Image (cartoon, helix red, strand yellow):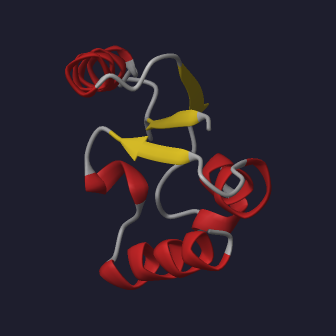
Amino acid sequence: MTTYAYLRVSTDRQDVANQRHGILEYANIHGLGLIQFVEDGLSGRVAWRERAIGQLLTTTATAGDVVIFAEISRMARSTLHVLEMLEIRMERK
């Protein structure tokens, strides 16, 4: 089992440091072990399947892997997109 953390910033004025810190804190509390970070700098306006999260959810992560996010806004811009992502992951176990 691999634990992935998806970090996304959408402007040059942002950085992933706060997201990374929060995820590492969460991982330590919950004993998740090593985290593989996936960083993305594309705007949420770009379709999720075309961003690094699309590759992670549809190809990279396999059955039993865990994907975590600092907050839901880093995952997707709409509830529909979140549901699509969850459906993909459920299909891939």
At 32% from the left and 17% from the top, the residue drawn is 24
Find the residue positioned furthest to the right. 59
* In this view, 51 is above or below 1: below
How far across and how far down the image is residue 13, in percent?
Answer: 36, 23
Position of 25 with respect to 41 (left or right) is left
Position of 21 with respect to 29 (left or right) is right
Q: Quick one: quadrant of the N terminus?
A: top right
At 36% from the left and 49% from the top, the residue drawn is 74
Q: How many numbered badges does the structure rendering display?
A: 0
Which quadrant of the view contains residue 20? top left
* In this view, 62 is above or below 7: below
How far across and how far down the image is residue 15, in percent?
Answer: 39, 20
Q: Quick one: quadrant of the C terminus?
A: bottom right
How far across and how far down the image is residue 90, in percent?
Answer: 55, 76
* In this view, 48 is above or below 29: below
Question: Foreground: 11 or 68?
Answer: 68
Question: Foreground: 68 or 66?
Answer: 66
How far across and how far down the image is residue 73, in percent?
Answer: 29, 55
Position of 23 with respect to 6 (left or right) is left
